[in-house]
Image (cartoon, rainbow, N blue to C red):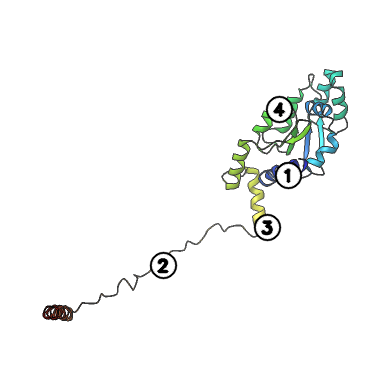
Amino acid sequence: MKLKRQKHAKRILSFYKTHFNIQAPFQVLLDGTFSQAALRGKININEQLPKYIGPGVKLATTSCVLQELESIGKAVYGALVILKQFPVLPCGHKDRKQPLSANKCLQKMLGKDNPHKYFIATQDRTLTEHAASLPGTPLLFIYMNTVVLDKPSKHCHQVADELARGSVAPAEEQKGTILQLKRSAGLEEPQSKLIRRKKIKGPNPLSCKKSKKVDQKSTHVRKEGRNRHKRNKNKNMGTS
């Protein structure tokens, strides 16, 4: 079963690598719900995630996530201790009079298109739905005391297909970079191309070949000979 899970994760990671350029080391943002579920399932996040999705995983959280757990109190103290062992990424919400909830904070970290290629590790339904709406955002959750990498959503597959077909135009800031890469590789197309006109081909010589005239006289002679042969044959049969 463990080998099957690893193959499942490898296949999904290959999809994200190919279509959304998500490369190792993977950055995983953890929230309190995921940490609490790991504690209940006796899952060592620091050991299991690198084994599941590959070495070099960077696990992190935000100050808003920690503050939310601290405000809840003793019920989630163990989850708070687990998250404090990981780096705290700057989210920009620490100096607010009222810090954002963990849910809102991580949504802000993802932005409109997840430019930093974050993985989201959560059990929160609202955050899960938000992550699924952003193509190229891998989602981790815990099910039956096991860490699972969720399948890409239908919307994610649709965007990947459009990118593969080249129907999505590059952003304006990417066009200059693409042009420079083409120039350095000698692949830039000339501004003006010579239009090659198709040569007008002559008629097919076989179609112009004159048809052979049928010699009506010789045809008549052959027919007369066949008829005469039949008459002689019939006479012979009558006399016998």
Q: Amino acid at mark 4?
A: Leu
- Residue at image coords 64%, 52%: 179
175 with respect to 60 (left or right): left
For mark 3, what is the residue?
A: 184
Three-letter amino acid code at disc 2?
Answer: Lys
- Tell me which residue sits at (78%, 38%) in the image: 27
Cβ atoms under marks 1 and 2 closer than 8 Å: no
Going from N to C along the chain, the mark reached first, 1 or 3, is 1
Give residue 199's mark: 2
Q: Which residue is mark 1?
A: 7
Residue at the far front in the pictured view: 240
The answer to whether 225 appears left or right of 142 in the picture is: left
55, 44: nearer the viewer: 44
Q: Amino acid at mark 1?
A: Lys
**Circle 3 sits in a helix, a strand or a loop, which is it?**
helix
For the residues labelled 1 and 3, the Cα–Cα distance comes to: 39 Å
The local crowd at label 1, few if under 14, some if 14 to 19, many if 20 or more residues have their Cα within 10 Å, is some
Look at the numbered disc 2 and give the secondary structure of its residue: loop
